[in-house]
């Protein structure tokens, strides 16, 4: 729930200061304490699922007032299954190895100096996200497991849901002996609060925005600290000339239809001309039976009469809904060129029985994840064994792809000597 704030800048400053103190305290918290907090939080989420669902109902009842799209309402909704998935996600993070203090590498220099590269927390993470309250638990779990304090700034659309979840996390934190302010929720919908936090690099180590492209671009432009991000998810599935038809249909339908309003859903289909006559009408039929509108090039429209002509904008688009762009190409080279040109560098998939084609696709596609004979929807922290994710990065520095606990850490060098001096 949002609160009136008399002095917004002071409110944000005090929250950031509390987070920095909590981060320093977390450095002394044991892995066992963090594991207890994660498991106790998961237990309380399940025990209080009805209370969470009631809070979520309040948010859903106001969705029309905020003008949310169908995709946004879907992201906002907490079903019993999604609440259970939140709890399972915290349990999964609890089972991951303790990252802090891990010796990444170690060597002994000729003078006897022992040099170790040791994993350490980032510090304070400012996490901004929109109408996905299930992300609240995932983000808190990963940040704290990695030894970081986190400031959560969820969208106003999910205010009641987020408050209910964070209340549970705080109760479990008190039982585990974690710092009181390791997880804080910004209790105002004022957009200026985001700007204040983005101007506090002395307290906040990194900002992670997760939401619409306009939000992420604003954060990137205003932040005075590093930002881990992706702007959009224009994900492609390429059906190679050797693609198994049954597999191709299953993967495309899953990638596009399993859940449309998410960043790893397929938005573009590319089909090799050698199999387009037989395969494209079949796949298009399966998509249209599920309410998907086809927008394609001239050859697509000839093979699929119900298709609409695609524009240049269609090939760049992240629809987050029941539309897919289609292009027929004459070669693997042309497919790769098309994908790299229009891609948002998020996730691309190839369906093929040709190992050389798979290798070329994996080597030459410039995206954070490449799927070989698998759905784009599998580019996910949980599916990749990270326990959960705080987001997917399309950057190349520090973190790329799904960001789990290791991506929320840094490292420092610790050198052990016996009196060595520089000659």
Image: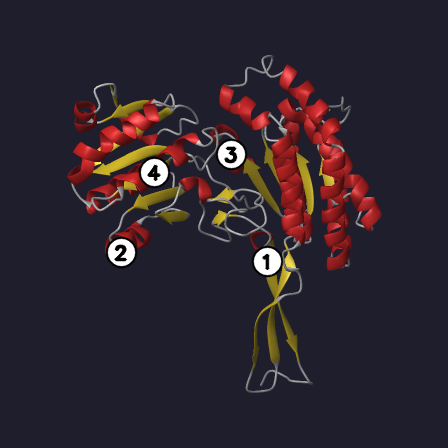
Decide which of tag 1 and tag 2 comes sooner along the chain: 2
Colouring chosen for the image of the structure: secondary structure
Disc 3: which residue: 216
Q: CA distance from mark 4 to mark 3?
A: 22 Å
Please tell me whether mark 4 or mark 3 is closer to you in this view.
4
Residue 124 visible (yes or no): no
Q: Please state which of residues 330 and 274 is positioned toward the viewer in this rendering.
A: 274
Residue linked to disc 2: 355
Specify the quadrant that holds the C terminus.
bottom right
Residue depicted at x 20% and y 23% = 301
Secondary structure at badge 2 equals helix
Q: Earlier in the sequence, mark 3 or mark 2?
A: 3
Determine the image quadrant of residue 363.
bottom left
Pointer 4 residue: 236
Inter-mark Cα distance, 3 to 2: 37 Å
- Residue at image position (18%, 26%) is 303
Q: Secondary structure at mark 4?
A: strand
At horizontal 20% and vertical 42% (from top left) the residue drawn is 334
Residue projecting furthest to the front: 246
State yes or no: discs 4 and 3 in contact (Cβ < 8 Å): no
In this view, the mark in front (4 or 1):
4
Sequence-first disc among 4 and 2: 4
Q: Which mark is residue 229?
A: none
Q: CA distance from mark 1 to mark 2?
A: 36 Å
**Residue 410 numbered tag:** 1
Residue 6 visible, this angle: yes
Query: Is tag 4's residue or tag 3's residue first in the polypeptide sequence?
Result: 3
Query: Mark 4: few, some, or many residues within 10 Å (few <14, many ≥20)?
Result: many
Q: Residue at x 50, y 29 (%)?
A: 212
């Amino acid at each position: 729930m949002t609160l009136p704030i008399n002095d917004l800048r002071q409110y944000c400053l005090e929250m950031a200061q509390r987070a920095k103190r909590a981060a320093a305290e977390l450095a002394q918290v044991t892995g066992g304490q963090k594991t207890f907090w994660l498991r106790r939080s998961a237990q309380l989420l399940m025990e209080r699922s009805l209370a969470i669902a009631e809070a979520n109902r309040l948010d859903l009842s106001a969705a029309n007032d905020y003008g949310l799209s169908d995709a946004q309402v879907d992201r906002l909704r907490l079903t019993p299954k999604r609440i259970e998935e939140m709890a399972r996600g915290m349990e999964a993070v609890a089972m991951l190895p303790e990252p802090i203090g891990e010796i990444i590498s170690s060597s002994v220099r000729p003078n006897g100096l022992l040099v170790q590269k040791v994993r350490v927390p980032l510090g304070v993470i400012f996490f901004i996200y929109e109408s996905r309250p299930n992300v609240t638990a995932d983000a808190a779990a990963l940040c704290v497991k990695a030894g970081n304090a986190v400031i959560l700034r969820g969208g106003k659309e999910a205010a009641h849901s987020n408050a209910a979840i964070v209340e549970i996390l705080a109760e479990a934190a008190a039982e585990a002996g974690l710092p009181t302010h390791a997880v804080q929720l910004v209790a105002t919908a004022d957009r200026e609060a985001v700007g204040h936090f983005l101007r506090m690099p002395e307290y906040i180590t990194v900002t992670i925005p997760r939401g619409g492209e306009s939000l992420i671009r604003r954060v990137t432009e205003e932040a005075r600290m590093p930002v881990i991000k992706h702007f959009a998810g224009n994900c492609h599935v390429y059906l190679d000339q050797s693609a198994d038809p049954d597999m191709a249909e299953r993967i495309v339908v899953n990638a596009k239809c399993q859940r449309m309003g998410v960043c790893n859903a397929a938005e573009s289909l590319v089909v090799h001309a050698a199999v387009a006559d037989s395969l494209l009408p079949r796949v298009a039929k399966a998509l249209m039976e599920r309410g998907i509108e086809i927008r394609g090039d001239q050859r697509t429209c000839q093979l699929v009469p119900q298709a609409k002509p695609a524009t240049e904008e269609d090939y760049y688009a992240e629809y987050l809904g029941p539309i897919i762009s289609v292009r027929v190409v004459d070669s693997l080279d042309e497919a790769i060129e098309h994908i790299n040109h229009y891609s948002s560098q998020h996730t691309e998939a190839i369906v093929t029985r040709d190992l050389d084609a798979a290798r070329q696709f994996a080597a030459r596609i410039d995206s954070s994840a490449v799927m070989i004979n698998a759905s784009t929807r599998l580019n996910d922290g949980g599916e990749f064994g990270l326990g959960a994710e705080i987001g997917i990065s399309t950057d190349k520095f520090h973190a790329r792809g799904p960001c789990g606990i290791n991506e929320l850490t840094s490292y420092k060098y610790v050198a052990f000597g016996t009196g060595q001096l520089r000659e």
